[in-house]
Image: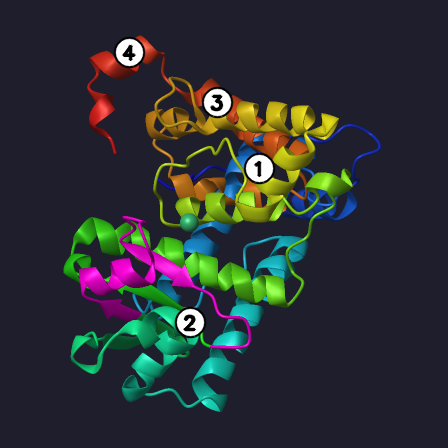
Amino acid sequence: MAANLSLKQEPYEAGDVTQTSPASRIASNLEKNHFNLEKLSDEECLELSSQCGNFYAAFIQKLIGKNNNKSDSTKLPEALRLKLEKIQKAVEKHSQIQHTKLQIEPKDALGILTQAFPHTLSEFTSDEKPKINFQELSTGFYAISLPSKFFDRLYKNSGAQAVAVIVPNGISFVMLRESYGNAQAYLKHNLPHESHHIAWSHCKAENLIECDEPDPTIKKAPPPYQDELVATICSNAKIHGHLQFSGAQRAELSKEKKPQLDYIDEKVVLLYDLLNPNQSESLNDLITRTGHQTQEMLLPVLLAKNFDELLQNLQRFATILKKKAPPTEEYRSNGWGSVG
Ligand SMILES: [Zn+2]
């Protein structure tokens, strides 16, 4: 359920802002505090987060060709509207480059795959060449579905149903496992999830992903972590905490065993506990019990520029939802557990 709450009218403490209208208070607090959610009331946080989640989910749905409506950003405070519109423009720009300059047609699909997986595809003999289904889901945004055995050869030992194939200076696309192509759950979660990863890569190319993690040894870690969280959030799946970072960052940390590893471990363990879907009173549990949607958690993740902010922002929302949630016993006895 989307939060449909009116904003609190109570004034803020002296020193915060002087405006009295809720919209201008939010806008001013966002500007002054660099999107610090701490200065917003609970209702303002939920309202803003609902709008932000709706905007981004609609944007991703449009990207995958499920929705032709332009995302509505008119109700958002200016600073947040500009941030989201920059993301939208960056993705549109890169999609337009893929569509116009490169003039891609379905017959180019094998070439696109070869560009992404040159060594593996060159091993295929001509009669093994996979039957490829190529789709332009929206302008310049592509999906290529492949028979399962070819999918596994290209994306080895993954068990994944779909993957975002990101090719710097080349064609990025979502690669789908053909046999699952029509399954509802697959379309509902996997396609938006992987499409977000491509959108995020375009934002990275435009330097839109802000990170000010103070510790140089982990400064690259928050964005990939947030990338994965936003992917689950915008597809309205359960948010999963991760105990590990991906790729080089993890290897670098493990290799050196710096004291910072303890620091970041502590943060990541706290995030993991907060986000673990199997944990009672986790953020996922609270979202379900209060009738909210996962996509409404986009704002606290998107605004964070380091792990401290990410943890604080998500804890803030967990606290807000905890106040609204029915007690666990009542929730179970009323049969709300079936809400998915
Ligand atoms: Zn992912």
Q: Amino acid at mark 2?
A: Ala
169 relative to 233, above or below: below
**Label 1 C-beta lies within 8 Å of the nearest ligand 1 atom:** no
Q: Is residue 79 magenta?
A: no
For the residues marked 4 and 3, what is the alpha-carbon distance in whole angstroms? 23 Å
Q: Is residue 298 left or right of residue 10?
A: left
According to the image, label 2 marks what residue? 116
For the residues marked 2 and 3, what is the alpha-carbon distance in whole angstroms? 36 Å
Q: Amino acid at mark 3?
A: Asp
**CB of mark 1 within 8 Å of CB of mark 4?**
no
According to the image, label 4 marks what residue? 330
Front position in the image: 28 or 197: 197
Mark 4 or 3: the one toward you: 3
According to the image, label 1 marks what residue? 44
For the residues marked 2 and 4, what is the alpha-carbon distance in whole angstroms? 52 Å
Q: In the picture, which quadrant includes the N terminus?
A: top left
Q: In the picture, which quadrant includes the C terminus?
A: top left
Residue at (30, 73) in percent of width and height: 123
Q: Secondary structure at mark 3?
A: helix
